[in-house]
Structure formats: C-alpha cells, structure tokens
Amino acid sequence: MSVRQSLLAMLDEGPRYGAQMRAEFEARTGSTWPLNVGQVYTTLTRLERDGLVVSEGQDENGHVLYRITEAGSQEVADWFATPVDRVAPTRDELAIKLAFAVTVPGLDVARVVLRQRAATLGALQDYTRLKDQLMDDPDELPWLLVLDSLVFAAEAEIRWLDHIEARVARAADQRTRKPQPRPVAAR
C-alpha cells in the first residue's frame, strides 16, 4: 500500500492537514492498515521536498494545511493508471514460516498447518460477518472493497494450506518409500 500516493490522492480532492489525512486514510481502508500520524507528516515533508505538495498556511485551529501541486496531481493520475507490480511479491510471513517448518526435524508441520487453517477460518468468518453488516450501506463501498480483498485472500490461503498439507504428506510418503542404500559387505 502506497501511503505516498494515497495522501496525494486525498490532497487531489482539496487541501487537508496531516491528522485529518490519517483519519481519512483509516476511514477509507476500514482501519485495515493503521497509519501513524508521524508517518503522515514525514511523508508530507518528503512530498513537499519533492515539489508534489505545498504547505498552504494554517486553518482556524492552527493545523498546517497542504495542497497538491500540478506535479502531484500528475503522480496521482499515473498511480491510478499503472497496474500494481506483482513481479516482486511482498514478503509473506506464513510462506516463510512454513518453508522453515518443513526443514525443522521433528516438527509436526501438519499441526502448524492445522492451527493456521483454524485461525484463517476464524478471520474469514469475521470478515464475512462484517461484510454482511455493511452490505446495504453505499457509503461503505471503500471498506467493502477492502473486506472483499481480505475474504478472497483468506479463501486463497485456506486452499493453499490444503495444498501444503497434501504436498507435505506426499513428500513424507516418498521419503518412506525411497530405497535405502544397501550396506557394502565387508571383505
């Protein structure tokens, strides 16, 4: 998730101050990706340095307002026009955990998979319940889209865990059927 482009997209709608953008970011994403207000202001400082935003004085409460520049608007347009790059996938903690798990002697990998499946199913149920509660509110569309993504990711993870369970079982079966080298007779 690009915080930089998200902040620019909000500013493309009109001037805002940092804490306001943080709250709006979380509202638009259903608080799925919590954003630290310090990160917002650090990003705004960099955007200002890069000529993509300018500070535009203060509002009546003393908040520094930021406005997007023409170059910033162009970056937002480019962001929306460019597909998300899937060539360099993000690190997946579960994939790394399971890759290590299958290399640890004596570890019950099936049990690790079973626990993860139960946790993922629980999350999937929570996401589905929340979706059902919000489904009829057109103002919740941004959050519903995020929830859809989370539901689909959880469903895919469950299928992947089923696949891993079968693959680990197959590998264990192949190891037990592997012909053992015959000892060389002493001369």
Image (cartoon, rainbow, N blue to C red):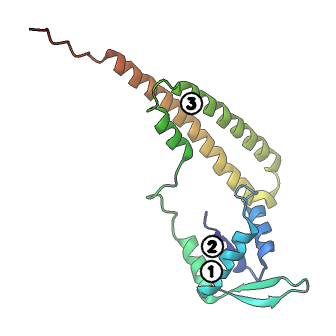
How far, Cα to Cα, is label 1 from label 2?
9 Å
Could you say which is closer to the camera, residue 89 or residue 107?
A: 107
49 to the left or right of 182: right
Q: Is residue 167 above or below residue 25?
A: above
Q: Where is residue 169? Give x, y as percent.
A: 45, 23
Task: Identify the residue under disc 3.
Answer: 113
Q: Is residue 108 above or below residue 17?
A: above
SS for callout 3: helix
Amino acid at the residue labelled 3: Val
Task: Identify the residue under disc 1.
Answer: 46
Q: Residue furthest front?
A: 187
Could you say which is closer to the camera, residue 149 or residue 47?
A: 47
Q: Return the mark for residue 4.
A: 2
Q: Give the mark nearest the N terminus, 1 or 2.
A: 2
Q: Residue at x 57, y 39 (%)?
A: 157
How far, Cα to Cα, is label 3 from label 1?
42 Å
Marks 1 and 2: which is nearer the front?
1
